[in-house]
Image (cartoon, rainbow, N blue to C red):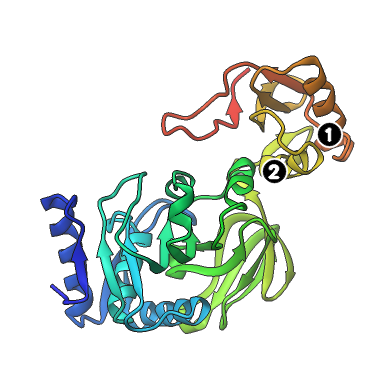
């Protein structure tokens, strides 16, 4: 085991073995390294990626976050996934001091950290004291819902949300949480929009014209705003609506609104009707929500408010599309 890598006492034998195995992949010096895609650009699949491309991604991260040998970081994610695997290899390649933690929603570590990569659910479980013990936090693995962004924007540390996928060797663009919805590409990366879909060019990482299933507004070759997933769009009356965009507009027009989100409901007239799922509302809250809808173009306004228990997927995420 690398002398700079230590295990938290709560790590079980399986966690220790999996981390050591993935660490050995890096220290072996092999020209190709194994990663598993999540399905952002198609069906999940296994990839063998060139070491030089992984190294370039690591160097890009080091520049963006001012990472250096001897700095302290921690590994809180499963190394079966790309995010955890790249975090481990990043720490080894940059000779950082790495604490390996158990995989848990409740993350804790010893001392102060210079850098920490998390999924949003882990960050949302932080106590106020934990934020003061880490200089920079990178979130990834899932989009931030509006209410999550609002909660995390209060964190007293530098907090980024990364945009990327396995095929781009994790994040290739960043934005500051709570400050700006625009993602800005790291050096050597450019983007364009083709038929509304994000296309990524990162030749230094071996990526050329990679088309994702993400709907975006491209501002220039180096910046874009994410609208939602093309495969999650609601087709209502022949028009394509991205529910995440509706969420953001309503949050701005009605700050602190009761928990709720935009979704689609099968409809004989519209194909899919855009609706707003909400926890039960008072008369005043309902009136404010209807007023907030007026911040949207008429064709993007929810046609119904459905109050009650919010529909969720088995994993606890919002279930945006329901049958009639």
Residue 321 location in percent, x, y? Answer: 59, 29
Q: How much space separates mark 1 and mark 2, taking CA atoms?
A: 17 Å
Q: In this view of the protein, which residue sits in the foreground, 99 or 55? A: 99
Give the vertical position of 191 relative to 9 (above or below).
below
Disc 2 marks which residue? 242
Q: In this view of the protein, which residue sits in the foreground, 178 or 215? A: 178
Q: Residues within 10 Å of mark 1 (few under 14, many from 20)?
A: some
Q: Is residue 47 visible?
A: no
Q: In this view of the protein, which residue sits in the foreground, 122 or 82? A: 122
Which part of the image, by quadrant, shows the N terminus? bottom left
Where residue 185 sits, quadrant-wise, is bottom right
Q: Residues within 10 Å of mark 2 (few under 14, many from 20)?
A: many
Residue at 17% in and 58% down = 18
Residue at 19% in and 50% down = 10
Disc 1 marks which residue? 292
Q: Nearer the viewer, mark 1 or mark 2?
A: 1
How many marks the image carries: the answer is 2
Describe the element under mark 1 as helix, strand or loop. helix
Residue 237 location in percent, x, y? Answer: 79, 32
Q: Is residue 94 visible?
A: yes
83 vs 173, left or right, is: left
Where residue 254 sits, quadrant-wise, is top right
17 vs 318, left or right, is: left
Give the vertical position of 92 relative to 166 (above or below).
below
Which part of the image, by quadrant, shows the C terminus? top right
Residue at 55% in and 24% down = 311
12 vs 221, left or right, is: left
Q: Which mark is residue 263?
A: none
């Amino acid at each position: 085991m690398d002398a700079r890598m230590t295990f938290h006492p709560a790590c079980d034998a399986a966690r220790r073995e999996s981390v050591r195995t993935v660490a050995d992949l890096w220290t072996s010096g092999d020209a190709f390294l194994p990663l598993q895609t999540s399905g952002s650009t198609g069906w999940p699949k296994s990839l063998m990626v060139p070491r030089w491309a992984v190294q370039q991604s690591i160097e890009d991260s080091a520049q963006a976050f001012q990472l250096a040998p001897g700095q302290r970081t921690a590994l809180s994610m499963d190394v079966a996934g790309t995010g955890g695997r790249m975090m481990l290899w990043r720490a080894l390649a940059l000779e950082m001091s790495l604490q390996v933690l158990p995989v848990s929603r409740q993350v804790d570590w010893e001392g102060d950290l210079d850098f920490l990569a998390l999924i949003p659910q882990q960050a949302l479980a932080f106590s106020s004291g934990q934020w003061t013990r880490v200089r920079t936090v990178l979130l990834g693995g899932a989009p931030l819902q509006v209410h999550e962004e609002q909660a995390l924007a209060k964190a007293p540390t530098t907090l980024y949300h990364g945009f990327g996928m396995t095929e781009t060797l994790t994040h290739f663009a960043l934005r500051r949480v709570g400050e700006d919805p625009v993602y800005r590409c790291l050096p050597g990366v450019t983007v364009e929009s083709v038929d509304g879909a994000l296309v990524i060019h990162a030749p230094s990482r071996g990526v050329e014209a990679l088309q994702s299933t993400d709907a975006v507004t491209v501002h220039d070759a180096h910046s874009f705003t994410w609208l939602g997933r093309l495969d999650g769009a609601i087709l209502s009356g022949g028009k394509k609506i991205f529910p995440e965009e509706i969420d953001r507009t309503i949050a701005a027009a009605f700050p602190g609104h009761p928990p709720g989100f935009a979704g689609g409901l099968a409809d004989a007239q519209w194909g899919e009707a855009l609706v707003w799922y909400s926890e039960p509302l008072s008369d005043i809250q309902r009136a404010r929500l209807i007023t907030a809808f007026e911040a949207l173009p008429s064709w993007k306004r929810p046609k119904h408010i459905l109050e009650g228990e919010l529909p969720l997927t088995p994993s606890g995420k919002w279930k945006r599309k329901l049958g009639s």
